[in-house]
Image: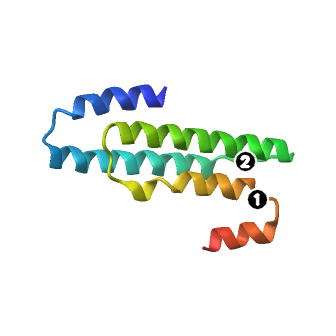
């Protein structure tokens, strides 16, 4: 549902002049990614099996791809945001605690 709502609002914002539109688009993109990450961090992800762990990571990756496609469609130039959610998905996929510590520390 968030994708539909975001798409509707972004369509309306396309009426703005390019510099203002791009600034606002980047800010919305950043805010959406930030909120997504905050929600992941607030939720207790208790994956008891590797399969559950993989499913959560795959869902995050899928939604990251959808968000990226949506904002690319509207011309977002905030390419630095592309890797945020896939990196979190990759950390969730990791099984080795030492590898997780290294990933988070980087």
Quarter placement of the C terminus = bottom right
In the rendered image, residue 100, in percent from the top left (x then y), is placed at 73, 66
Q: Which residue was labeled with disc 1?
A: 94
Query: Which image quadrant for residue 16?
Result: top left
Label 1 neighbour load within 10 Å: few <14, some 14-19, many 20+: some
Image-based side of 12 in relation to 92, left or right: left
Is 40 located above or below residue 3 in the figure? Answer: below
Labelled pair 1, 2 in contact (Cβ < 8 Å)? no
Front residue of 77/43: it is: 77
* Horizontal and vertical percent position of residue 86: 58, 52
Task: Tally the marks.
Answer: 2
Mark 2 surroundings: few (<14), some (14-19) or many (≥20) residues within 10 A? few
Residue displayed at 52% across by 46% down: 36
Q: CA distance from mark 1 to mark 2?
A: 14 Å
Residue 64 appearing in the image? yes
The disc placed on residue 105 is: none
**Residue occupying the far right of the picture:** 49
- Element assignment for label 1: loop
Q: Could you say which quadrant of the image residue 12 lies in?
A: top left
Q: Which mark is residue 45?
A: 2
> Position of 101 compared to 29: left or right?
right
Residue found at x 28% / y 29%: 11
Residue 29 in percent (x, y) is at: 38, 46
Residue at x 16%, y 49% (from the top left corner): 19
Q: Is residue 48 visible?
A: no
41 or 68: nearer the viewer: 68
Looking at the picture, how far across and down is residue 57, in whole percent? 69, 46
Q: Earlier in the sequence, mark 1 or mark 2?
A: 2
When the figure is inspected, residue 83 is found, relative to residue 4, above or below; the finding is below
Q: Secondary structure at mark 2?
A: loop
34 vs 71, left or right, is: right
Looking at the image, which residue is at 38% across and 42% down? 72
């Amino acid at each position: 549902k968030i994708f539909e709502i975001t798409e509707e609002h972004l369509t309306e914002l396309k009426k703005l002049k390019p510099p203002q539109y791009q600034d606002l688009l980047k800010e919305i993109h950043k805010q959406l990614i930030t909120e997504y990450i905050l929600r992941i961090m607030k939720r207790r992800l208790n994956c008891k099996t590797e399969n559950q762990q993989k499913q959560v990571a795959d869902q995050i990756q899928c939604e990251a791809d959808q968000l990226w496609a949506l904002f690319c469609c509207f011309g977002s130039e905030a390419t630095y945001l592309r890797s945020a959610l896939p990196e979190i998905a990759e950390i969730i996929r990791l099984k080795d605690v030492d590898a997780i510590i290294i990933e988070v520390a980087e």
